[in-house]
Image (tube, helix red, strand yellow):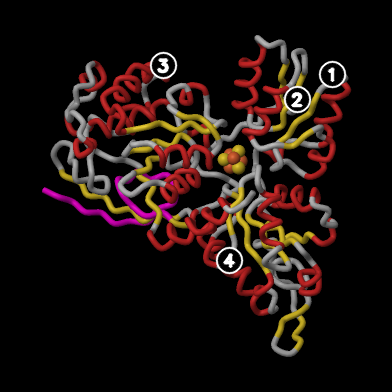
């Protein structure tokens, strides 16, 4: 007997196939009441990839009987360490048909199983070059979307826990961005604005930028993206991280008062009509005059992890450890970046530590898992690394991906089921790809 369920849900519900756009998922689940069905999960199964089928998972399968064998609930109650052997066994059975990607901020118990580690863009590009049919992305939702956009035909992307979102990406919803653009159109400003979105945004936002002549950038090429945009327009709408946008614009010499913040949550307090155009305060909390005088419109978004670092943390580190090098991610506040010795993307921060002479001490302003791993890795070279704020700078959403979720996703694949697939709608995928391809034009 077959059962077909169609539902929409916020991140968090398990499903076997579906579209995702702007944080809303439309889930289509096709279930057979008996055992595993290779048809579920968007069609293809590991068997289709030429793998040996069957639940020969030794102790793992032996402990989990019947049609509940791959229910997530059966995994969550087990201790962390009991997952290791099961992950390794499932990984071996799947062979080259599946790869595991681990973002730099992922927790140790998960990232140790990754075939590739890196930032989100590097991982997505790497995955597309592999022969793997199944890409298990141990990162957050927007990263899995990007892997799907950049992936080859036939590749399927899995996010082991759909609760792994990104607070920054969630701060720019497509309906809010469309409302912003509409307001800019009414003010006759949109024709001269190039939208740029940081990689850390939903596929829908990337598609919006692609469709409106803009592009995507990473934290390492944001300046080049600004330069690209200023050759084509008078001003930039930068989404969704105000800090990366402000730090980039400031480094290019753009005065602070020419970078205004667009607050999508601001309540319209009043308006002044001039001809057919609304002047005075508009819904963003800005005036039309300020918008018209600006060069960069900064979307009011931020990373909850990087915004925790404060200028006082830099002062404390320098007072306690004279000569310490403070290096921070450009998602940190402008005031923190101004006090730091250097800024850099995750890959650039790692390179800075690698190049430093023996004996250098660093305080690093980024996610704690990366900082701790760097501290362990470079201790043998006599380099000492501490976090800029030891009260906890954890990406709690990425942390949701546990060994249990990874084991669950892998063992379902072994049994012929694709769970938690992230599939971007074709139209959105097309325009998001356009925006990503424009990024490749950057020097
Ligand atoms: S560290 Fe910040 S920007 Fe990166 S995934 Fe976590 S919440 Fe999002």
Of pointers 2 and 3, the one earlier in the residue sequence: 3
Give percent across and percent down for residue 255. 85, 57
Q: Which residue is the extreme one toward the left?
A: 1
What residue span does the magenta drawing correspond to? 1-20
Packing grade of label 3 (10 A; few <14, some 14-19, many >=20) is few
Q: Position of residue 372 (x, y in %)?
A: 63, 21
Residue at 30%, 47% (x, y): give it: 154
Residue where numbered disc 4 is placed: 213
Residue 240 in magenta? Answer: no
Looking at the image, which residue is at 48% across and 34% down? Answer: 400
First-in-chain label (3 vs 4)? 3
Residue, disc 1: 321
Q: Callout 1: 10 Å neighbours few (<14), some, many (20+)? A: few
* Pointer 3 residue: 81
Identify the mark at residue 363; answer none if there is no mark: 2
Which secondary structure lies at badge 2? strand
**Label 4: which secondary element:** loop
Whether the residues at callouts 1 and 3 have beta carbons within 8 Å, the answer is no
The answer to the question of whether label 1 and label 2 lie on touching residues, with beta carbons closer than 8 A, is yes
């Amino acid at each position: 007997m077959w059962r077909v369920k169609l539902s929409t849900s916020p991140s968090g519900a398990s499903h076997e196939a579906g579209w995702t756009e702007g944080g809303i998922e439309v889930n289509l689940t096709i279930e057979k009441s008996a055992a595993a069905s290779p048809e579920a999960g968007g069609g293809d199964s590991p068997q289709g990839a030429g793998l040996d089928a069957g639940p020969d998972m030794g102790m793992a399968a032996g402990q989990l009987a019947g049609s509940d064998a791959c229910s997530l609930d059966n995994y969550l109650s087990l201790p962390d360490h009991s997952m290791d052997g099961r992950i390794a066994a499932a990984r071996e059975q799947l062979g080259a048909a599946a790869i595991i990607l681990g973002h730099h901020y992922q927790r140790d118990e998960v990232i140790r199983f990754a075939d590739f580690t890196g930032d989100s863009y590097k991982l997505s590009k790497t995955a597309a070059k592999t022969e793997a049919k199944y890409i298990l992305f141990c990162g957050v939702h927007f990263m899995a979307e990007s892997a799907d956009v950049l992936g080859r035909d036939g590749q399927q992307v899995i996010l082991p826990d759909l609760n792994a979102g990104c607070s920054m990406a969630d701060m720019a919803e497509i309906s809010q961005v469309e409302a912003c653009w509409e307001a800019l159109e009414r003010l006759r400003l949109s024709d001269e604005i190039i939208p740029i979105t940081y990689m850390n945004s939903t596929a829908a936002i990337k598609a919006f930028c692609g469709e409106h002549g803009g592009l995507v950038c990473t934290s390492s090429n944001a300046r080049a993206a600004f330069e690209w945009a200023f050759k084509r327009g008078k001003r930039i709408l930068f989404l969704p991280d105000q800090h990366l946008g402000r730090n980039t614009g400031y480094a290019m010499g753009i005065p602070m008062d020419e970078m205004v913040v667009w607050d999508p949550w601001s309540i319209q307090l009043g308006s002044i009509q001039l001809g057919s155009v609304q002047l005075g305060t508009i819904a963003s909390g800005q005036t039309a005059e300020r918008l018209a005088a600006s060069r960069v419109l900064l979307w009011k978004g931020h990373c909850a992890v990087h915004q925790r670092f404060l200028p006082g943390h830099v002062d404390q580190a320098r007072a306690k450890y004279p000569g310490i090098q403070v290096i921070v991610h450009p998602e940190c506040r402008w005031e923190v970046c101004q006090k730091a010795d250097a800024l850099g993307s995750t890959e650039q921060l790692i390179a800075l530590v690698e190049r430093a002479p023996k004996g250098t001490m660093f305080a690093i302003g980024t996610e704690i898992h990366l900082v701790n791993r760097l501290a362990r890795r470079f201790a043998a070279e006599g380099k000492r690394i501490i976090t800029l704020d030891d009260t906890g700078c954890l990406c709690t959403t990425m942390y949701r991906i546990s060994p249990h979720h990874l084991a669950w996703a892998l063992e379902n694949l072994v049994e012929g089921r694709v769970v938690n697939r992230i599939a971007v709608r074709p139209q959105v995928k097309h325009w998001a790809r356009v925006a990503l391809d424009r990024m490749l034009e950057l020097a």
